[in-house]
Image: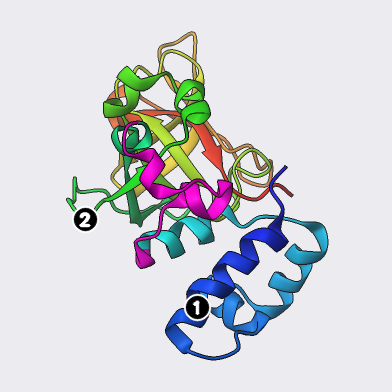
Amino acid sequence: MLKLDEIIEKLRDVLSSEKMGKVFDKDIANALDITSVNFATMKKRNSVPYSNILDFCALKKISINWMLYGQDPSSLIDSTDKYWIRYYPSIRVSAGGGAYDEEENFEKLEMPDFFVNIIGGHDNLKNIEAINVTGDSMEPTLNNGNIIFIDKTKHDPSKDGIYAFVNENGLFVKRIQKRVDGGLDIISDNKEYPAQVVAKNEIEVLGKVISSIGKVF
């Protein structure tokens, strides 16, 4: 089990080398874009803010494998160097809609070997892209701040599942179920949001959500 205290010490070392002085918890919280109150709660619960740490590592060009697992980056040349996917940190998807225009501002997100197997194996990595979730429409399955992994080869909504799709209102991630009349039920796992019915030609499916990382509430 990952220990947040150990990760915090690595974060402290990185920030200390830049600040040339003592680094306090508030400095770490600020670097992770987390409020001091939430950061204190995470420490108490040993809740690792994965998406915030991924953003931090991408910004600082630090190996996520070193940050989370203590692996020497030089030992990863023959393994994880070729195990990465495209991560679009500026793309956010959920209830309020988002934007997706095939932008090229992606970052390489290194994948530990065990996680590569979870999302379909090494040969499937070229088909996977990662984007952020915002909003609460898919709670408790997907929470605000989660990073979701989308398989862009799976875009047939007639097969029940959670999909990222575009319609005239923007970019969304919802559960889709096929109706007997050929229409599609667009379902939010958060029951406070009503289900919608659309025709298949009213949406453009980008891919199926096959995994996620982030907070669990």
- The rendered magenta stretch, by its main secondary structure, is classed as helix
Q: Residue at x 64, y 83 (%)?
A: 26
Q: Which residues are magenta?
A: 59-78
Q: Nearer the viewer, residue 79 or 60?
A: 79
* Mark in the foreground, 1 or 2: 1
The residue closer to the viewer here, 35 or 50, is 50
Counting other residues with Cα less than 10 Å from the Cα at mark 2, is it few (<14), some (14-19), or many (20 or more)?
few
Residue under numbered circle 2: 105
Q: Does residue 95 belong to the magenta stretch?
A: no
Describe residue 113's horizontal placement relative to residue 2 as left or right: left
Q: Amino acid at mark 1?
A: Leu
- The answer to whether residue 175 is visible is no
- Secondary structure state at the residue bearing disc 1: helix
76 is higher (above) or lower (below) than 53:
above
Residues 10 and 160: in front is 10
Give me the C-alpha separation between circle 1 and circle 2: 25 Å
Does residue 70 show up magenta in the picture? Answer: yes
Q: Which residue is mark 1?
A: 15
Which element type, helix, strand or loop, lies under badge 2? loop
Please tell me which residue is depicted at 55% across the width and 69% down the height of the picture. Answer: 11
The image quadrant of residue 139 is: top right
Which amino acid type corresponds to the residue marked 2 in the rendered image? Asn
Q: Give the x, y percent position of residue 210.
A: 48, 27
> Where does the image place residue 23, in percent across and percent down from the top left?
60, 84
Marks 1 & 2, CB-CB < 8 Å contact? no
Question: How far from the left and from the top, in percent, is residue 12?
Answer: 58, 74
Q: Earlier in the sequence, mark 1 or mark 2?
A: 1
